[in-house]
Image (spheres, coloured by chain):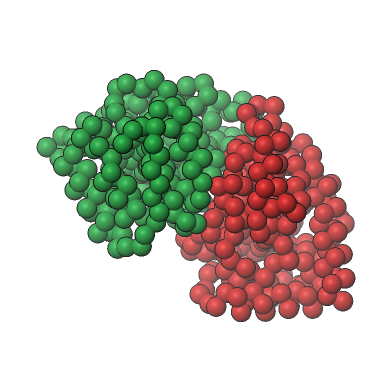
Chain colours: A green, B red
Amino acid sequence: MSSRTIRVYRDLMGANAEWAGKTRRLLDKKGVVMLNLIGSPGSGKTALLERLGSGLSEFRFAVLEGDLETTRDAERLDRLDVRVSQLLTGGACHLEAKLVHHALRDLPLGELDIVFVENVGNLVCPAEFDIGEAAKVAVLSVTEGEDKPLKYPLLFRQAKAVLLTKSDLLPHIRFNLDECLGFLHSVNPRIRIIKTSALSGEGINEWLGWLLHLKSTCVAASA
Amino acid sequence: MSSRTIRVYRDLMGANAEWAGKTRRLLDKKGVVMLNLIGSPGSGKTALLERLGSGLSEFRFAVLEGDLETTRDAERLDRLDVRVSQLLTGGACHLEAKLVHHALRDLPLGELDIVFVENVGNLVCPAEFDIGEAAKVAVLSVTEGEDKPLKYPLLFRQAKAVLLTKSDLLPHIRFNLDECLGFLHSVNPRIRIIKTSALSGEGINEWLGWLLHLKSTCVAASA
């Protein structure tokens, strides 16, 4: 598949846990790490992936783009020559493991290090579904306010890391960073917190370092 | 019920359409208009209601606050002496009509003009549920990007109005207002669009005017 082709997958119903297990075994065998990015609409998930697309050579990656209806985010990444497939849920509020599995099967997994799944923009439902990922990563923009970890605790409890996005806007908004960090730690004491801005580049190297560490840990564990 | 008391209602399952119908008949009889506010987490729904709480005398209103787990938003409004009840979904991603109906029954409807329901922060699932409202109102912050009406079309197709919030941040972000207005009109040519900022006060009077007009229209229709 050329990186200039966007394939479109539509949702199919199925027993979720079974498909997630299949996916985990497949990725283990291939030594590929899959991350499940979950955040509100407009929290900056695609912008972070665009930032990786612009000139990252430390690992080879592909993106599975979850959306209700449109292929807009996939087209944004395709313009940067990122290998991307579009997953359409047909109106459903989250991605399920079967749909992800079928799309993965068509990727050249032997040539990849990491697969990012950009889930549907939603802090609630995607957190409830295992899609076979190595880690869930929460994406929370500072414009959303400090208290979202308390109000949507399932995601932040399950996530291995949270990317606090749009840090370039901090001078212009009322956002108490210390309070937000306190809320995050109260919900999940072990969560890794990375403050980022796709615009200024803040935190992008730290995120890359975290990704590379996760990749080496996962490969060591499955060896 | 004192306006300084927050009552807490928990979700119960039920036939949604039937409860929505009961609610509509009850509100018609009482001459009360109910609005269903739907937007992403952190889009500024509570901030808009706080703005109404601070010194609005043109109509009498109450708020039903939908949340997964916490009573934080209800407490924000309670501090302003707004009459508020908390609806807890117990993790569910949207409000259902039965829960709303039971909370409404405990409000002094004869003393109210408008009831605002602040739905769970989510652009997808709440749009699928009729709770007996006179109108759905979409709340979209400019920090979320121009394309959300295309990506989450059901809500914007159903809404009678959209509040474009956080307009005070426009000088600091890349947001093409004309493009966003075009997307909104392509999804729903009749939607009323009001640009607002709870911080600067922009658009608040326009929103109040829209509310008063809706109230007079609904009362005339049910007379």
Location of residue A31 (image quadrant): top left
Q: Position of residue B194 (x, y in %)?
A: 76, 45
At a point 33% along the width and 49% down the height, the residue shown is A100
Q: Position of residue A49 (x, y in %)?
A: 43, 32
Residue farthest to the left, as pictured: A223
Q: Tell me the quarter of the image containing the N terminus of chain A.
A: top left
At a point 62% along the width and 56% down the height, the residue shown is B155
The one of B19 and B217 positioned closer to us in this rendering: B217
Q: Tell me the quarter of the image containing the C terminus of chain A.
A: top left
Q: Position of residue B51 (x, y in %)?
A: 75, 47
At a point 71% along the width and 74% down the height, the residue shown is B24
A106 lies left or right of A198: left
The one of B65 and A217 positioned closer to us in this rendering: A217
Q: Position of residue B120 (x, y in %)?
A: 57, 57
B68 lies left or right of B116: left
Q: Is residue A68 visible?
A: yes
